Amino acid sequence: MNIKEFTNNKVIDESKQGQATVIKNDSENYTKSLYIESYGCQMNFSDSEVVASILSKEGYATTKNIDQADVVLINTCSVRENAEQRVRNRLQEFKKRKKDNPGLVVGILGCMAERLKHSLLEEEKLVDLVAGPDAYRDLPNLIVTVDGGQKAVNVLLSREETYADISPVRLDQGGVSAFVSITRGCDNMCSFCVVPFTRGRERSRDPETILKECKELFEQNYREVTLLGQNVDSYRWNLDSNGSPKDGHIESVNFHQLLEKVALIHPDLRIRFSTSHPKDMTDDVIQIMTKYKNICPYIHLPVQSGDTEMLEKMNRGYSREWYLERIESIRRIYPNCAISTDIISGFCGETEEQHQQTLSLMKEVHFDFAYMFMYSERPKTLAERKYADDVPIETKNRRLTEIIELQNKHSLESNQKQIGQIHEVLIEGLSKKSSDYLCGRNGRNSMLVFPKLKGLEKGMYVQVKINSCTSATLLGEIVL
Ligand code: SAH
Ligand code: SF4
Ligand code: F3S
């Protein structure tokens, strides 16, 4: 089953949720230890690296061992109820830890911190410190306040903060793939979604700082960057809301122009991006992808539902027909491009026919991969205020199972089609199951596993012939 209940991300798998961020202690100036655990989307994992960077300047080295920590931070997600429940359970464990070690500072970051604010301190008494996604520069002060015996909160959202000048300390030192945030926040207000409330208004990051970060990553031997935003297609720098250059600005940049600039850094630096929005993704983006071999042929284009009335209720800004037209454009301009999606089952008032529309859209598009979720009502959202969450849980569940079963069939078929082909793969390391095998992704974002050959290591590109597959993995051998 492919249910990723805790993430919308396309790279971090379930096993990495809740993993500690670890940074090598490469300075003697570190005097204190920070343990930081991340949940949720790629943006949160990327933010944890910003947090580690801010606190490293204050003398904090990160540790994998929670027993050694002076400060424990948990970077949280609110997207679905069960994501929050998992964090609450973890906080109870931290609370026990604090009983044995009263000096320990426990803090909550991210979307749940923003959503629940003071209540985590006052009613629930779970933590000492609460910092929302735009308040991380204030963490050193907040920790000092806690050390002084008080509780500390900063949940102010900003219209400007992009942490543009902060060079994130990488979670995966010596890794090959890194996340680079290009926008923060979201202005879309899909009716089911809590993100606009937890992340605030959308803002784009200065392209110069994005390019600088990507160049530095390449110099540090990273070979893949994923440009992150809740809606990357609405990236705009010095453009007004109609997409025209703002007065007095010579250099304006939109998303496809940014993609091109990043692609030009080096042909050996692969570029991915997430998430594309069907209402905003232009043909220019697809055209630029075909122009540069190092922009991966993969688009994540969440549909949510195959029914126009449901999409309207979800406030997604497109119809079934519009979505299918976007898919047609991708197929026409870039036939080999892989496409994945997100789907929600059992949104407010969803009828059996409307559910069938989702299945029929899936059959029409034949997604290579999908992240599938049961609708979970979120406080403050338009859907919570306006519509009844009236699809019984058993029905939501049954519909989700039907969606997952259909997608598994499509994923397998999409993998089977690749058998016999030779794909370029960026080696990520040893296969999880056997040290005699290596693993890595092709441009289409499929995971390939193949026997190890001498002299090969992570970060290298190899040509792999695909011999067989499961619905999740392609198996092959290196061809020289
Ligand atoms: N910005 C991205 C997605 C962010 S959230 C986009 O617009 O596509 C990631 C995914 O979680 C969404 O695509 C949606 O499928 C799912 N999701 C969001 N809110 C949800 C909710 N209340 N219940 C169930 N799934 C939800
Ligand atoms: Fe949520 Fe919609 Fe924004 Fe995505 S585009 S983060 S689903 S409001
Ligand atoms: Fe979750 Fe916040 Fe990301 S709600 S999906 S961590 S933006």
Image (cartoon, rainbow, N blue to C red):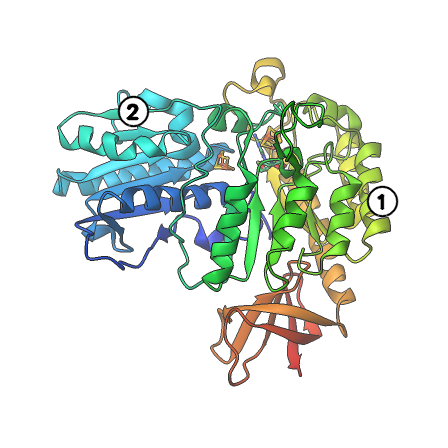
Residue 128 shows up from this direction? no
> Mark 1: is the Cβ under 8 angstroms from ligand 1?
no
Q: Nearer the viewer, residue 82 or 131?
A: 131
Indicate left or right for 266 with 167 as reference: right
According to the image, label 2 marks what residue?
Answer: 153
Mark 1 nearby-residue class (10 Å; few <14, some 14–19, many ≥20) = some
Q: Out of 273 and 94, give the one closest to the viewer.
A: 273
Give the quarter of the figure containing the C terminus: bottom right
Q: Are marks 2 and 1 in contact (CB under 8 Å)?
A: no
Decide which of tag 2 and tag 1 comes sooner along the chain. Answer: 2
Mark seen at residue 328? 1
Residue 93 as seen in the image, left or right of residue 186: left
Question: In this rendering, would 166 be left or right of 352?
Answer: left
Describe the element under mark 1 as helix, strand or loop.
helix
- Under mark 1, the amino acid is Glu
Q: Residues within 10 Å of mark 2 (few under 14, many from 20)?
A: many
Q: How many marks?
A: 2
Q: Residue at x 49, y 23 (%)?
A: 159
Q: Is residue 269 above or below residue 389?
A: below
Question: Which of 133/406 is in front?
Answer: 133
Q: Position of residue 197 (x, y in %)?
A: 50, 23
Name the element at disc 2. Answer: strand
Q: Identity of the amino acid at label 2?
A: Val
Distance (Cα) linking label 2 and label 1: 48 Å
Residue 182 in picture, x, y percent from top left = 55, 40
Q: Quadrant of residue 383?
A: top right
Measured as percent of width and height from the top left, residue 418 is found at 75, 67
Residue 352: in sight, yes or no? yes
